[in-house]
Amino acid sequence: MKLTFVSIEDSITAIGFRKMAAIARQIHPETQVSYIVPTGKRAFLKLIFRKDASEPTMSNDDIKNIGDYLAGFDMVCFSSMTPFADITKQIIATIRAINSKTYVVWGGVHPILYPDDAIQFSNAICVGEGEFAFKNFLYAYEKDHDYTATKNFWFNINGNIIRNAFLPLLTSEEMEKCPSPLYASDELIYKKGRGFMPLSTSEYLLFNDITYTTVWTIGCPFKCTFCHNSKLIKMDRNYAKLRHPSVDYKIKEIKSVLEKHPYISLVKFYDDSFIALPSNVLTEFADKWKTEINLPFWIFGMIPVYMKRDKMKYLVWAGMSRAKMGIQSGSDKILKFYKRFDRPGLNAKSISIMSEFSKFMLAPIYDIIVDNPIETKDDIVATLQMFYDSPRPYRLYIHSLRILPDSEMERDFAALNIFPEDIGSILGNVKPTLANAMFHLLSVFKPPKWLFSLVIKHIRPYERTPRASIFFNIAYYLYKARLFLDRIIAMDFSVLLGKFGWILWKLGIVGFIQRRRMKKAYSGIMLN
């Protein structure tokens, strides 16, 4: 059987897809693995000039070329997120028109969160964890057994939808048995107008630069209504538990990547709840990372309630050079609306712990959500005041509120007669309001008290009509310039062509700067 796995997203990072592709290769060593990146190699100019975000598209010629090629396979397994669902559907339709016998399986975030949509376009969809489920499905399919009974799968049999129950979620011990994610192993990438071409080191550099992105832990105990995890927990409450393979398993994965791409100079962990790991596990991780990997790493999964000084100390000592924590709002009322765990002073205390270690790493990053239609002036001012008073340096990642379809938040807003179309699409930009201008400015420097007080007086609740565009644009470009400088200091060249970062690595400049920074952090932590 000719089997192909196809990722459709805005990068080639594809962490979950790479896990599944590795499993497919275990079963079928000849499985082809391909990446389609509709947005192109970088949307850098759109980022700089604040072009409105929109649904990614591909030309009809490219859709046809992709469909022509994939129609030659017996089974095509897609993976995509919701922003790329329409393109996935177009490609499936093209395949169907050419070869109706090609069996189409769709996995990834979109089928998990919106199965009733995805199943209309596929022969089968994976609606839960795919590691064991896909093995069960493929074995049954090849042996001509009743594969339509496979758990974690739905099937479309001539319009008749079979909805199977869920398998238990993987345990940590079962995760340990899974292969490391597929990486730099005979993959293809679709190049517009040219077709599928070998994915070379040059493409890895262009998309991923001199970094490697991964996830170690799965799960989050909270049900914040702005997060897809709230929907996952509704499907299976065990999504609230933190699950992960051993430290040795993760170290082995990183070593394998470094063997293939020794230029990797930074590892980014995109776990939801990394900091929630027990102290003894983080201590083991820190010791082995320092001894066996000894590279800087970033962690994006910091949760205020789990922020502890000893945990930060272990991680910074081991090489953590940046961390990101979700704050979302300085208003207790808004945090309650998001159903986010909160207690008086929690965010301020967690920020204080993070800032204590900022002298040993890059400025910590805090996520906030803006453009919420139920925010009053007091809610907005509370968030501004919290960050005005917070210790520096820090950077804010500012996100315009977007409502997940068929979510608890959507129902909460509907009860207030507010609907997603009243706020914007899932891909909108931050509104150029006076408050948002000040959030960007606070990320760059602490304005004089008189300027901050002046802005506070003119803050208004969320409005659909943008205001203060000139002030916002000035603040926005200062903010982008600051982030750009941060990346240069960090030797993270994701805002530049990846080849340039490779040249600096080859010349030893990246390693020299990083060794100095890590030595300073190590010495400082030992004395702290």
Image (cartoon, grey):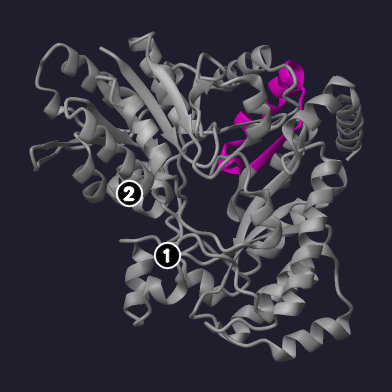
What residue type is disc 2 on?
Answer: Leu
Q: Residues within 10 Å of mark 1 (few under 14, many from 20)?
A: many
What residue type is disc 1 on?
Answer: Ile
* Residue 7 screen position, x and y as percent: 43, 32
Residue labelled with disc 1? 403
- Relative to residue 155, is residue 70 drawn left or right? right
The dominant secondary structure in magenta is helix
- Relative to residue 256, is residue 434 drawn left or right? right
209 above or below 330?
Answer: above
Q: Residue 310's quadrant in the figure?
A: top right
* Residue 303 screen position, x and y as percent: 59, 51
Q: Nearer the viewer, residue 452 or 174?
A: 452
Q: Marks 2 and 1, Cα distance to the nearest angstrom?
A: 13 Å
Q: Residue 521's quadrant in the figure?
A: top right
The structure residue drawn at horizontal position 43% and vertical position 18%, both measured from the top left corner, is 22
Q: Nearer the viewer, residue 68 or 490?
A: 68
The structure residue drawn at horizontal position 41% and vertical position 46%, both measured from the top left corner, is 84
31 above or below 522?
Answer: above
Q: Which mark is residue 113?
A: 2
Looking at the rendering, the stretch of residues picked out in magenta corresponds to 273-299
